[in-house]
Amino acid sequence: MSNDIPFEVLTELEENFKYLHQHPETALKEFKTTAFIKDYLENKCKVELLDLGLDTGSLAIIRGDSNYGSVGFRADIDALPLEEQTTLDYKSKNEGCMHACGHDAHTAILLAFARLLSLDNPFKGNVIFLFQPAEEAEHGGQRVVDAGLFSKVKIDRFFALHVTPELNVGQIAISAGPFSANVDRFSYEIKGIGTHASTPYKGLNPIKALELLSNRLSSLVAQNIPCGDKALISLTHVSSGSTWNIIPDFAYAEGTVRSFSASARSTIIEKMTQLKTVLEAEGYKVEFNFIKGCPATNNDPKLSELIKEEATKLGLTVVSQRANLGGEDFSCFQEHVPGAMFNLGTGIGPSLHNGKFKVDPDALKIGLNVYNSILKRLSRV
Ligand code: NI
Protein backbone atom coordinates (compact mmCIF):
# COMPACT_ATOMS: atom_id res chain seq x y z
CA MET A 1 0.00 0.00 0.00
CA SER A 2 2.80 2.40 0.83
CA ASN A 3 4.85 1.53 -2.25
CA ASP A 4 4.55 5.05 -3.59
CA ILE A 5 5.95 6.65 -0.40
CA PRO A 6 9.73 7.06 -0.62
CA PHE A 7 11.74 4.98 1.84
CA GLU A 8 13.43 8.01 3.46
CA VAL A 9 10.06 9.59 4.24
CA LEU A 10 8.87 6.42 5.98
CA THR A 11 12.16 6.10 7.88
CA GLU A 12 12.00 9.70 9.09
CA LEU A 13 8.33 9.27 9.97
CA GLU A 14 9.16 6.50 12.42
CA GLU A 15 12.26 8.28 13.75
CA ASN A 16 10.32 11.49 14.34
CA PHE A 17 7.52 9.60 16.07
CA LYS A 18 9.96 7.91 18.44
CA TYR A 19 11.81 11.17 19.14
CA LEU A 20 8.53 12.96 19.92
CA HIS A 21 7.38 10.07 22.10
CA GLN A 22 10.58 10.30 24.12
CA HIS A 23 10.27 14.06 24.58
CA PRO A 24 6.67 14.83 25.56
CA GLU A 25 5.62 18.28 26.77
CA THR A 26 2.27 19.34 28.25
CA ALA A 27 -0.14 22.04 27.04
CA LEU A 28 1.44 25.44 26.29
CA LYS A 29 4.87 24.12 27.30
CA GLU A 30 5.61 22.46 23.96
CA PHE A 31 8.75 24.59 23.36
CA LYS A 32 11.21 21.84 22.38
CA THR A 33 8.48 20.07 20.40
CA THR A 34 7.82 23.32 18.53
CA ALA A 35 11.53 23.83 17.83
CA PHE A 36 11.77 20.26 16.52
CA ILE A 37 8.75 20.73 14.25
CA LYS A 38 9.98 24.06 12.87
CA ASP A 39 13.47 22.69 12.26
CA TYR A 40 12.13 19.72 10.31
CA LEU A 41 9.67 21.84 8.31
CA GLU A 42 12.31 24.38 7.38
CA ASN A 43 15.30 22.18 6.77
CA LYS A 44 13.83 18.94 5.50
CA CYS A 45 10.53 19.98 3.96
CA LYS A 46 11.50 23.43 2.65
CA VAL A 47 8.02 24.73 3.36
CA GLU A 48 7.27 28.33 4.29
CA LEU A 49 6.72 28.94 7.99
CA LEU A 50 4.08 31.49 8.98
CA ASP A 51 3.61 33.22 12.32
CA LEU A 52 0.99 31.31 14.30
CA GLY A 53 0.91 34.15 16.85
CA LEU A 54 1.40 31.85 19.86
CA ASP A 55 4.45 30.84 21.89
CA THR A 56 4.13 27.19 20.91
CA GLY A 57 2.78 25.39 17.86
CA SER A 58 3.55 26.10 14.25
CA LEU A 59 1.88 27.06 10.99
CA ALA A 60 3.33 26.31 7.55
CA ILE A 61 2.22 26.60 3.95
CA ILE A 62 3.09 25.24 0.55
CA ARG A 63 1.91 28.01 -1.72
CA GLY A 64 0.12 27.22 -4.93
CA ASP A 65 -2.44 28.91 -7.12
CA SER A 66 -5.26 30.15 -4.88
CA ASN A 67 -7.75 29.53 -7.67
CA TYR A 68 -7.37 25.84 -6.88
CA GLY A 69 -8.31 26.42 -3.25
CA SER A 70 -6.59 25.76 0.06
CA VAL A 71 -6.58 22.52 2.00
CA GLY A 72 -5.54 22.42 5.66
CA PHE A 73 -4.29 19.56 7.83
CA ARG A 74 -4.01 19.79 11.60
CA ALA A 75 -2.00 17.87 14.18
CA ASP A 76 -2.16 18.52 17.91
CA ILE A 77 1.24 18.37 19.61
CA ASP A 78 0.82 18.30 23.41
CA ALA A 79 1.24 15.43 25.87
CA LEU A 80 -0.27 14.60 29.26
CA PRO A 81 0.94 14.92 32.86
CA LEU A 82 1.07 11.16 33.33
CA GLU A 83 3.81 8.65 34.14
CA GLU A 84 4.49 6.26 31.26
CA GLN A 85 4.13 2.59 32.21
CA THR A 86 5.16 0.89 28.97
CA THR A 87 8.37 -1.03 28.41
CA LEU A 88 9.05 0.56 25.03
CA ASP A 89 12.71 1.19 24.24
CA TYR A 90 11.67 4.70 23.22
CA LYS A 91 9.56 5.46 26.30
CA SER A 92 9.25 8.98 27.70
CA LYS A 93 12.41 10.59 29.04
CA ASN A 94 10.41 13.31 30.78
CA GLU A 95 9.32 12.09 34.18
CA GLY A 96 5.60 12.45 34.82
CA CYS A 97 4.87 13.34 31.22
CA MET A 98 3.71 11.07 28.43
CA HIS A 99 2.26 11.12 24.94
CA ALA A 100 -0.67 9.00 26.11
CA CYS A 101 -3.13 10.43 23.57
CA GLY A 102 -1.08 9.77 20.43
CA HIS A 103 -0.38 13.39 19.58
CA ASP A 104 3.21 12.30 18.88
CA ALA A 105 1.80 10.10 16.10
CA HIS A 106 -0.39 12.94 14.78
CA THR A 107 2.60 15.29 14.67
CA ALA A 108 4.95 12.75 13.07
CA ILE A 109 2.37 11.91 10.38
CA LEU A 110 1.79 15.56 9.49
CA LEU A 111 5.55 16.25 9.37
CA ALA A 112 5.96 13.26 7.07
CA PHE A 113 3.16 14.58 4.90
CA ALA A 114 4.92 17.94 4.53
CA ARG A 115 8.11 16.02 3.65
CA LEU A 116 6.30 13.88 1.11
CA LEU A 117 4.74 16.92 -0.56
CA SER A 118 8.13 18.61 -0.74
CA LEU A 119 9.15 15.71 -2.99
CA ASP A 120 5.92 15.14 -4.88
CA ASN A 121 2.93 17.47 -4.56
CA PRO A 122 -0.10 16.66 -6.69
CA PHE A 123 -2.11 19.67 -5.51
CA LYS A 124 -2.07 22.96 -7.42
CA GLY A 125 -3.60 25.07 -4.64
CA ASN A 126 -2.30 25.95 -1.16
CA VAL A 127 -1.62 23.32 1.46
CA ILE A 128 -1.66 24.49 5.09
CA PHE A 129 -0.06 22.57 7.97
CA LEU A 130 -1.22 23.48 11.46
CA PHE A 131 0.64 22.08 14.47
CA GLN A 132 -1.73 23.06 17.26
CA PRO A 133 -0.66 23.37 20.90
CA ALA A 134 -2.73 22.60 23.99
CA GLU A 135 -5.46 20.27 22.80
CA GLU A 136 -5.63 18.45 26.12
CA ALA A 137 -5.95 21.59 28.22
CA GLU A 138 -5.86 25.37 27.93
CA HIS A 139 -8.16 25.61 24.88
CA GLY A 140 -5.44 25.42 22.21
CA GLY A 141 -7.83 25.22 19.27
CA GLN A 142 -9.67 28.34 20.35
CA ARG A 143 -6.36 30.12 21.01
CA VAL A 144 -5.26 29.39 17.45
CA VAL A 145 -8.54 30.78 16.10
CA ASP A 146 -8.31 33.83 18.39
CA ALA A 147 -4.72 34.42 17.26
CA GLY A 148 -6.16 34.99 13.78
CA LEU A 149 -5.58 31.70 11.94
CA PHE A 150 -8.28 32.40 9.39
CA SER A 151 -7.05 35.92 8.71
CA LYS A 152 -3.54 34.59 8.07
CA VAL A 153 -4.51 31.75 5.79
CA LYS A 154 -7.59 30.84 3.83
CA ILE A 155 -8.64 27.24 4.37
CA ASP A 156 -11.48 25.75 2.33
CA ARG A 157 -11.36 22.24 3.69
CA PHE A 158 -9.73 21.10 6.91
CA PHE A 159 -8.66 17.57 7.87
CA ALA A 160 -7.30 15.88 10.97
CA LEU A 161 -6.92 12.43 12.42
CA HIS A 162 -6.85 10.94 15.90
CA VAL A 163 -5.36 7.59 16.79
CA THR A 164 -7.54 5.02 18.50
CA PRO A 165 -6.64 1.88 20.46
CA GLU A 166 -10.15 0.57 19.78
CA LEU A 167 -9.28 -0.35 16.19
CA ASN A 168 -6.63 -2.55 14.65
CA VAL A 169 -3.93 -1.30 12.32
CA GLY A 170 -5.58 -1.17 8.90
CA GLN A 171 -8.91 0.06 10.22
CA ILE A 172 -10.20 3.63 10.31
CA ALA A 173 -13.43 5.15 11.60
CA ILE A 174 -15.23 8.10 10.02
CA SER A 175 -18.80 9.40 10.18
CA ALA A 176 -20.61 12.58 9.18
CA GLY A 177 -21.85 14.80 12.02
CA PRO A 178 -20.67 14.95 15.63
CA PHE A 179 -18.49 12.32 17.28
CA SER A 180 -17.41 14.35 20.32
CA ALA A 181 -19.50 16.59 22.54
CA ASN A 182 -19.95 20.22 23.59
CA VAL A 183 -17.80 20.32 26.74
CA ASP A 184 -19.13 22.92 29.17
CA ARG A 185 -18.52 23.69 32.82
CA PHE A 186 -20.87 25.03 35.47
CA SER A 187 -20.81 26.12 39.08
CA TYR A 188 -23.30 27.25 41.73
CA GLU A 189 -22.16 29.41 44.65
CA ILE A 190 -24.86 29.22 47.31
CA LYS A 191 -25.08 31.58 50.24
CA GLY A 192 -27.25 30.53 53.18
CA ILE A 193 -27.29 31.63 56.82
CA GLY A 194 -24.93 29.96 59.27
CA THR A 195 -26.02 29.05 62.76
CA HIS A 196 -25.55 26.56 65.60
CA ALA A 197 -26.22 22.97 64.56
CA SER A 198 -28.87 22.73 67.28
CA THR A 199 -30.89 25.68 65.96
CA PRO A 200 -31.33 25.14 62.20
CA TYR A 201 -34.55 27.22 62.32
CA LYS A 202 -32.40 30.29 62.99
CA GLY A 203 -30.35 29.81 59.81
CA LEU A 204 -30.60 28.58 56.24
CA ASN A 205 -28.53 25.47 55.66
CA PRO A 206 -26.85 25.56 52.20
CA ILE A 207 -26.32 21.78 52.37
CA LYS A 208 -30.08 21.44 51.89
CA ALA A 209 -29.65 23.49 48.71
CA LEU A 210 -26.95 21.06 47.55
CA GLU A 211 -29.37 18.17 48.09
CA LEU A 212 -32.04 19.86 46.02
CA LEU A 213 -29.53 20.79 43.33
CA SER A 214 -28.13 17.28 43.10
CA ASN A 215 -31.63 15.76 42.83
CA ARG A 216 -32.79 18.17 40.15
CA LEU A 217 -29.59 17.94 38.11
CA SER A 218 -29.67 14.14 38.09
CA SER A 219 -33.07 14.09 36.38
CA LEU A 220 -32.81 17.30 34.34
CA VAL A 221 -31.61 15.66 31.10
CA ALA A 222 -34.16 12.82 31.22
CA GLN A 223 -36.99 15.28 31.87
CA ASN A 224 -36.07 17.86 29.23
CA ILE A 225 -34.02 16.40 26.38
CA PRO A 226 -35.51 14.08 23.74
CA CYS A 227 -34.11 10.57 24.14
CA GLY A 228 -32.37 10.51 20.75
CA ASP A 229 -30.38 13.63 21.60
CA LYS A 230 -27.65 12.50 23.97
CA ALA A 231 -26.59 14.78 26.82
CA LEU A 232 -25.22 14.45 30.30
CA ILE A 233 -24.80 16.51 33.46
CA SER A 234 -22.13 15.35 35.91
CA LEU A 235 -21.95 17.01 39.30
CA THR A 236 -18.32 16.40 40.20
CA HIS A 237 -17.34 18.65 43.07
CA VAL A 238 -19.31 19.91 46.08
CA SER A 239 -18.08 21.50 49.26
CA SER A 240 -19.62 23.04 52.35
CA GLY A 241 -19.09 23.25 56.07
CA SER A 242 -16.10 22.68 58.31
CA THR A 243 -17.21 20.77 61.37
CA TRP A 244 -20.00 18.81 63.10
CA ASN A 245 -21.77 21.44 65.15
CA ILE A 246 -21.95 24.46 62.84
CA ILE A 247 -24.46 24.92 60.07
CA PRO A 248 -22.36 26.63 57.41
CA ASP A 249 -23.33 29.72 55.48
CA PHE A 250 -21.92 28.72 52.10
CA ALA A 251 -21.89 25.80 49.68
CA TYR A 252 -20.27 25.26 46.32
CA ALA A 253 -21.13 22.86 43.52
CA GLU A 254 -19.54 22.40 40.12
CA GLY A 255 -19.50 19.95 37.28
CA THR A 256 -19.72 19.49 33.55
CA VAL A 257 -22.42 19.39 30.92
CA ARG A 258 -21.92 17.35 27.76
CA SER A 259 -24.22 17.54 24.75
CA PHE A 260 -24.12 17.07 20.99
CA SER A 261 -26.75 19.49 19.70
CA ALA A 262 -27.07 23.25 20.09
CA SER A 263 -30.70 22.80 21.16
CA ALA A 264 -29.86 20.35 23.97
CA ARG A 265 -27.12 22.70 25.13
CA SER A 266 -29.41 25.74 25.25
CA THR A 267 -32.27 23.83 26.94
CA ILE A 268 -29.88 22.64 29.65
CA ILE A 269 -28.56 26.17 30.21
CA GLU A 270 -32.14 27.47 30.48
CA LYS A 271 -33.20 24.78 32.97
CA MET A 272 -30.04 25.14 35.06
CA THR A 273 -30.65 28.89 35.23
CA GLN A 274 -34.22 28.17 36.43
CA LEU A 275 -32.75 26.03 39.20
CA LYS A 276 -30.98 29.12 40.50
CA THR A 277 -34.42 30.78 40.76
CA VAL A 278 -35.82 27.74 42.58
CA LEU A 279 -33.02 27.98 45.15
CA GLU A 280 -33.51 31.74 45.49
CA ALA A 281 -37.21 31.14 46.21
CA GLU A 282 -36.03 29.09 49.19
CA GLY A 283 -34.13 32.13 50.44
CA TYR A 284 -30.61 31.36 49.24
CA LYS A 285 -28.47 33.85 47.35
CA VAL A 286 -27.10 32.05 44.32
CA GLU A 287 -24.43 32.77 41.68
CA PHE A 288 -24.73 30.49 38.66
CA ASN A 289 -21.88 30.31 36.17
CA PHE A 290 -21.97 28.44 32.90
CA ILE A 291 -18.77 28.43 30.88
CA LYS A 292 -19.09 27.21 27.32
CA GLY A 293 -16.04 25.19 26.33
CA CYS A 294 -15.05 23.30 23.27
CA PRO A 295 -18.04 22.79 20.93
CA ALA A 296 -19.10 19.41 19.53
CA THR A 297 -17.25 18.21 16.46
CA ASN A 298 -19.19 18.37 13.22
CA ASN A 299 -17.78 16.28 10.38
CA ASP A 300 -18.77 17.62 6.98
CA PRO A 301 -20.80 14.91 5.16
CA LYS A 302 -19.04 15.34 1.78
CA LEU A 303 -15.54 15.35 3.24
CA SER A 304 -16.39 12.37 5.46
CA GLU A 305 -17.58 10.46 2.41
CA LEU A 306 -14.42 11.42 0.55
CA ILE A 307 -12.25 10.01 3.37
CA LYS A 308 -14.34 6.85 3.45
CA GLU A 309 -13.98 6.30 -0.30
CA GLU A 310 -10.25 6.96 -0.37
CA ALA A 311 -9.56 4.74 2.64
CA THR A 312 -11.58 1.94 1.06
CA LYS A 313 -9.55 2.29 -2.16
CA LEU A 314 -6.40 1.91 -0.07
CA GLY A 315 -7.74 -1.42 1.15
CA LEU A 316 -8.48 -0.22 4.68
CA THR A 317 -11.48 -1.37 6.67
CA VAL A 318 -13.75 1.60 7.30
CA VAL A 319 -16.15 1.58 10.23
CA SER A 320 -18.48 4.18 11.74
CA GLN A 321 -17.06 6.54 14.28
CA ARG A 322 -18.39 5.85 17.75
CA ALA A 323 -19.77 9.05 19.27
CA ASN A 324 -18.57 9.87 22.78
CA LEU A 325 -19.19 12.59 25.34
CA GLY A 326 -15.53 13.58 25.45
CA GLY A 327 -14.15 16.72 23.82
CA GLU A 328 -11.99 17.38 20.74
CA ASP A 329 -11.10 20.94 19.88
CA PHE A 330 -10.75 20.37 16.13
CA SER A 331 -14.39 21.49 16.45
CA CYS A 332 -13.14 25.08 16.96
CA PHE A 333 -11.99 25.04 13.32
CA GLN A 334 -15.09 23.24 12.08
CA GLU A 335 -17.13 26.19 13.34
CA HIS A 336 -15.43 28.26 10.61
CA VAL A 337 -14.71 25.89 7.72
CA PRO A 338 -15.93 22.48 6.56
CA GLY A 339 -13.73 19.82 8.07
CA ALA A 340 -13.54 16.14 8.84
CA MET A 341 -11.54 14.14 11.34
CA PHE A 342 -11.14 10.39 11.25
CA ASN A 343 -9.89 7.84 13.76
CA LEU A 344 -6.83 5.86 12.80
CA GLY A 345 -6.57 2.34 14.22
CA THR A 346 -3.22 2.00 15.99
CA GLY A 347 -3.67 -1.45 17.50
CA ILE A 348 -6.15 -2.61 20.13
CA GLY A 349 -4.82 -2.09 23.63
CA PRO A 350 -4.97 0.11 26.75
CA SER A 351 -7.10 3.23 26.34
CA LEU A 352 -6.02 6.76 25.53
CA HIS A 353 -4.81 8.66 28.63
CA ASN A 354 -3.61 5.39 30.19
CA GLY A 355 0.07 5.01 31.13
CA LYS A 356 0.24 1.78 29.13
CA PHE A 357 -1.22 3.24 25.93
CA LYS A 358 0.83 2.38 22.83
CA VAL A 359 0.74 3.26 19.14
CA ASP A 360 1.84 0.53 16.73
CA PRO A 361 4.33 2.36 14.47
CA ASP A 362 2.99 0.36 11.49
CA ALA A 363 -0.13 2.51 11.65
CA LEU A 364 1.78 5.74 10.98
CA LYS A 365 2.25 5.16 7.26
CA ILE A 366 -1.45 4.37 6.96
CA GLY A 367 -2.33 7.80 8.34
CA LEU A 368 0.15 9.34 5.92
CA ASN A 369 -1.34 7.41 3.02
CA VAL A 370 -4.87 8.51 3.87
CA TYR A 371 -3.78 12.19 3.98
CA ASN A 372 -1.97 11.77 0.68
CA SER A 373 -4.97 10.11 -0.94
CA ILE A 374 -7.28 12.88 0.28
CA LEU A 375 -5.05 15.49 -1.34
CA LYS A 376 -4.68 13.51 -4.57
CA ARG A 377 -8.45 13.22 -4.76
CA LEU A 378 -8.89 16.98 -4.22
CA SER A 379 -6.32 17.59 -6.96
CA ARG A 380 -8.65 15.88 -9.41
CA VAL A 381 -11.75 17.87 -8.46
NI1 NI B 1 -6.01 13.46 21.84
Image: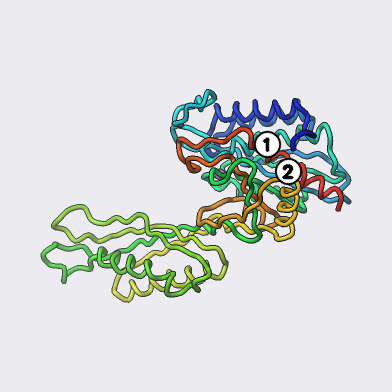
The residue identified by callout 1 is 109
- Counting residues from the start of the chain, the first of labels 2 and 1 encountered is 1
Q: Residue at x 53, y 37 (%)?
A: 79
The answer to whether residue 263 of the structure is visible from this angle is yes
Identity of the amino acid at label 2? Tyr
Comparing 128 with 164, the one in front is 164
Comparing 141 with 234, the one in front is 234
Secondary structure found at label 1: helix
Q: Is residue 276 above or below residue 38?
A: below
Task: Indicate which disc residue 6 carries.
Answer: none
Q: Residue at x 61, y 36 (%)?
A: 105
Residue 59: percent from left, percent from top: 71, 39
The residue identified by callout 2 is 371
Comparing 353 with 208, the one in front is 353
In this rendering, would 213 be left or right of 163? Answer: left
In this rendering, would 319 be left or right of 205? Answer: right
Comparing 61 with 342, the one in front is 342
Farthest residue toward the bottom? 281
- Density class for disc 1 (Cα within 10 Å; few <14, some 14-19, many ≥20) is many
Q: How many marks?
A: 2
Placement of the N terminus among the 4 image quadrants: top right
Q: Is residue 315 above or below residue 306?
A: above
User: Is ligand 1 within 8 Å of the beta carbon of the residue shown at mark 1?
Assistant: no
Q: Residue at x 16, y 71 (%)?
A: 201
Q: Residue at x 46, y 74 (%)?
A: 224
